[in-house]
Amino acid sequence: MKEPNTTKTNHKHIALDGRGEAFIVGTRVKIKHLLFYYRSGLTIEEILEGFPNITAAQFFDALSYYHDHKEQINKSFERDNLETIQEDLDVERSPDGTLKFHK
């Protein structure tokens, strides 16, 4: 059964949500979240322990999808970067944590 507002990909375990973000089918786990942990130096076993609903096959399919779509996923990482968000919204974060809007 297809999940609502999703698009199939040519990767068995990967679909795109309504915003075009790649995720593991049957979960809410986005590929970029797995990559974040992988890039931070965790082993595959450690990542799988932290995501018990993800199989090794799903994880490796996520890595394969990433290598087929690096530019798209890297742009998604960039969009999620706090500095990029602040720049896009033209806000500045004060030392006390409050936001100052420039617009």
Image (cartoon, rainbow, N blue to C red):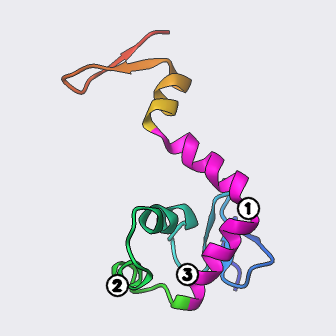
Mark seen at residue 69: 1
Q: Where is residue 79 shown, x and y percent of the image? A: 57, 41
Q: Amino acid at mark 2?
A: Glu
10 Å crowding of disc 1: few (<14), some (14-19), many (20+) = few
Name which of mark 3 and mark 2 comes first in the sequence: 2
Q: Nearer the viewer, residue 47 or 3?
A: 47
Residue identified by numbered label 2: 49
The quadrant holding residue 48 is bottom left
The quadrant of the rendering that contains the N terminus is bottom right
**Number of marks in the image?**
3
Name which of mark 1 and mark 2 comes first in the sequence: 2
Name which of mark 3 and mark 1 comes first in the sequence: 3
Left or right for 17, reference 89: right
Mark seen at residue 2: none
Q: Nearer the viewer, residue 97 or 18?
A: 97
Q: CA distance from mark 3 to mark 2?
A: 12 Å
Q: CA distance from mark 3 to mark 1?
A: 15 Å
Q: Where is residue 16 shown, x and y percent of the image? A: 69, 65
The quadrant holding residue 10 is bottom right
Mark seen at residue 59: 3
Question: Is-magenta flag for residue 58?
Answer: yes
Q: Which residues are magenta?
A: 57-81
Q: Amino acid at mark 3?
A: Phe
